[in-house]
Image (cartoon, helix red, strand yellow):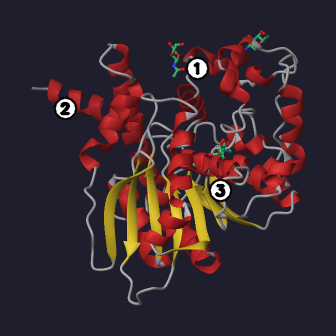
Amino acid sequence: MRTLPALLTVLTALTAYYVYTPLPSTLSEPWKLMFLDATFRFAQDLSNLAHYVGLSHHLRVLNFVCNYFDKLDPVSSAHLKVTDTLFDGVKVRIFEPKKETRGSLQRSIVYVHGGGWALGSARTRSYDSLCRKISEDVNAIVVSVEYRLVPNVHFPEPVNDVYAATKYFLQPEILAKYSADPNRIAISGDSAGGNLAAAVCQQLIQDENVTTKVKLQALIYPVLQIIDFNTPSYQQNMDMPILSRYVMIKFWLDYLNGSHSFAHAMLVNNHTSLDVGEAAALRQLLNWNSLLPLSFKKNYKPLIQNIGAPTIVQEVPALFDIRASPLIAHKETLQKLPKTYILTCEHDVLRDDGTMYLKRLEEAGVDVTHDHYEDGFHGCMLFASWPTYFSAGARTRDGYVKWLIENL
Ligand SMILES: *[C@@H]1O[C@H](CO)[C@@H](O)[C@H](O)[C@H]1NC(C)=O
Ligand SMILES: *[C@@H]1O[C@H](CO)[C@@H](O)[C@H](O)[C@H]1NC(C)=O
Ligand SMILES: *[C@@H]1O[C@H](CO)[C@@H](O)[C@H](O)[C@H]1NC(C)=O
């Protein structure tokens, strides 16, 4: 019977080892985050194991583990009518405030959920609640787009889905059907959804067939570039909870249908070394030395390889596609973009993606607002209620909603 306490001790030590990650004290609720992160890492390890033994693609398993038991039917409330429907063949969930005054036009927001282009859904509890909250507080119609996910599809299909659904909604007769005000429409998304929202917003302003102009874009800790994985925020936060640099690179490779075998070369920017044709010009656009404030640059040094791996762009031709990396768009495109809100978090590899985009937009003359959260971490806006309440979660969500109320 003496083996039991010994066994328990070993188990406890193992669990502690798995859960314990030293985190900066400037983070919102670091202990809670440690447990949340351990849960997520456990789900990832389980998915990788299932992939390894040939059960299914790791992203399909991960999505199943995270979301399968979490999908909600569209449930209307006293304030909102909630329905699932199709916009040009793309599934959408629509939240419509029940109007007190008939005939008046309403504001509207096209929302694109995050999850590395592979996880999440407009129907999960987290996104359903977020869109309800936005719809109620802003008193706006929210169209939450259920675009198809990796690995069932790859780039550019998710962009095409969001584009098709948005373009459908922007038609005068469809806006009229929903009593949506054509002058007060926003497009918004978080993380990979922010990437899709930014890409679609750039496409919309260049499409001569779209006559309705989007008034605002609001991007929440968006992914915006695959050129440089050594920006100060990628260097500073490479092992942060929820989204490490290595995991972000693997999400990118799965999205662009590239092999994971490139991941280690991309960690050191070998995919954009100076012997890669387009890389030098792209690096000029993305020169973070001039785009980031000193407080973000700190003492980090740019990592630019002279010789790298030119084969990666040959194998992954979408690598330099602007629809994948909206941050590398030309100034002529950026100039035409609507008023923009960008939310960034200090403890997030993507902090500098959002900040660089903001600076480029500002230089192009676009009206921009930057909300930066010193104690925020990637994905925190989804964690604003029990049992995964983080004060940074509630504050980021409330700040974002406030901006929409005031600007839409
Ligand atoms: C605009 O509509 C015309 C006619 O339907 C079509 O030929 C053209 O390709 C469309 N342009 C874009 C950018 O979709
Ligand atoms: C993705 O890559 C695999 C292997 O390289 C290839 O067989 C497949 O056709 C590609 N899929 C798409 C949608 O390009
Ligand atoms: C990066 O590329 C250089 C030159 O081809 C090579 O020597 C080095 O091993 C590569 N690094 C990684 C991590 O792949």
Question: Which residue is disc 1 drawn over?
Answer: 258
Does the image show residue 350? no
Badge 1 or badge 3: first in the primary sequence: 3
Q: In which quarter of the image is the N terminus?
A: top left
Circle on res. 41: none
Q: Do the residues labelled 2 and 1 touch (CB within 8 Å)?
A: no
Q: Does the residue labelled 3 lie within 8 Å of ligand 1?
A: no
The residues bearing labels 2 and 1 have C-alpha atoms spaced at a distance of 48 Å
Q: Which of these two is toward me, 360 or 351?
A: 360
Instruction: Assign a secondary structure to mark 2.
Output: helix
Whole-percent x, y for residue 90 in the image:
43, 46
- The type of residue carrying mark 3 is Val
Q: In this view, does 286 lie above or below 272?
A: below
- The type of residue carrying mark 2 is Pro
Are there few (<14), some (14-19), or many (20+) residues within 10 Å of tag 3?
some
- In the shown orientation, is residue 247 left or right of residue 406? left
The residues bearing labels 1 and 3 have C-alpha atoms spaced at a distance of 33 Å
Foreground: disc 1 or disc 3: 3
Circle on res. 210: 3
User: Quadrant of the rendered structure where residue 103 is?
Assistant: bottom left
Are there few (<14), some (14-19), or many (20+) residues within 10 Å of tag 2?
few
Q: In this view, does 116 lie above or below 303?
A: below
Q: Are marks 2 and 3 in contact (CB under 8 Å)?
A: no
**Which residue shows up at 34% across the image and 52% down it?**
124
Whole-percent x, y for residue 238 in the image:
63, 37
Foreground: disc 2 or disc 3: 3
Instruction: Assign a secondary structure to mark 3.
Output: loop
- The type of residue carrying mark 1 is Gly
Whole-percent x, y for residue 239 in the image:
58, 37
Circle on res. 5: 2
